[in-house]
Image (cartoon, rainbow, N blue to C red):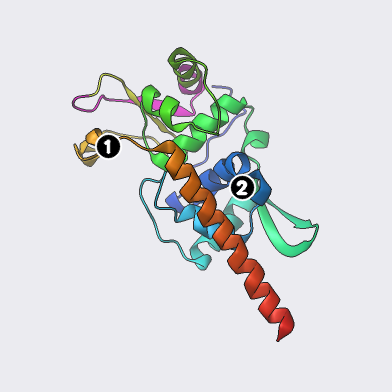
Amino acid sequence: MDNEIKIPVLSPEQIRVLGSLMEKAKTTPDYYPMTLNGLIAACNQKTSRKPVVNYDEETIGIALNSLKIAGLMSTATGGSSRATKYKHNFAIVYPLLPAEVAVMCLLFLRGPQTPGEINTNSGRLHEFETLEEVNQTLEKLAKEGYIKQLPKRPGQKEQRYAHLFSGDVEFVEEDFSTDELSTRPNTQLEERIAKLETELAELKENFEKLMKELY
């Protein structure tokens, strides 16, 4: 990997916030950059996330501040809303193609994935033409030091890949839970639920702002 490119060691909270911003920039562009309420809903989604978390405003605020210091996030204001909004700078800091950014986003939000899972879960993040394209993207990211190949799970033919933005990744026995092996995500349904959660968070924020102005 190029010596000029440094991979930071980010906390789980930072990874979730950064991944959520990366995802929503593509999947719900009408609500991007994101308000704090929208970002809280995105981080705490019960779909398309592993693990599922319940971060409060303070936790996400701390993660946002540290990401801003690292140059991975910036704020945006203006337009009809006076609320501070947040956007990621991942593709600015790292010279990655859209397909590569999509893969990193999935690994940030869903944990280790096989090429087949990435191809299935990429949804509106990026439309891969073939599984071979996914494999080529993974090989390039691994060669450049962004991700690492992990051992196969029992019953799986494909290798898994994990990102290296939380430090080096070792084999973890609990990762091999057989519960997940039988599940198949309904990507379209997940996307609809996630979009509704984002819209609800935005409506809540606008309502709270209106009530403050009235009283």
Q: Quadrant of the C terminus?
A: bottom right
- Residue 14: x and y in percent read 50, 50
| Residue found farthest to the bottom | 215
Can residue 126 be seen here? The reply is yes
Q: Residue 170 sits in which quadrant?
A: top left
* Residue type at the position of mark 1: Thr
Q: Residue at x 62, y 32 (%)?
A: 94
Disc 2 packing (10 Å; few <14; some 14–19; many ≥20): some
On whether residue 79 falls in the magenta region, the answer is no
Residue marked by disc 2: 70
Could you tell me residue 137's position as x and y percent? Answer: 50, 19
Q: Nearer the viewer, residue 62 or 78?
A: 78
In the rendered structure, the answer to whether residue 21 lies left or right of residue 133 reads: right
Quarter of the image with the N terminus in it: top right
Q: Secondary structure at mark 1?
A: loop
* Label 1 or label 2, whichever comes before in sequence order: 2
User: Which of the numbered marks, if any, corresponds to residue 72?
Assistant: none
Q: Is residue 36 above or below residue 88?
A: below
Q: Amino acid at mark 2?
A: Ala
* Left or right side of 115 for 129: right
Magenta region:
139-155
The answer for how far apart the CA atoms under marks 1 and 2 are is: 37 Å
Crowd class of label 1 (few under 14; some 14 to 19; many from 20; radius 10 Å)? few
On the question of residue 10 being in view, the answer is no
- Identify the residue position indicated by label 1 in the image: 183
Q: Is residue 78 above or below residue 153?
A: below
Residue at the extreme right of the image, as rendered: 79
Please state which of the two labelled residues, at mark 1 or mark 2, is closer to the viewer: 1
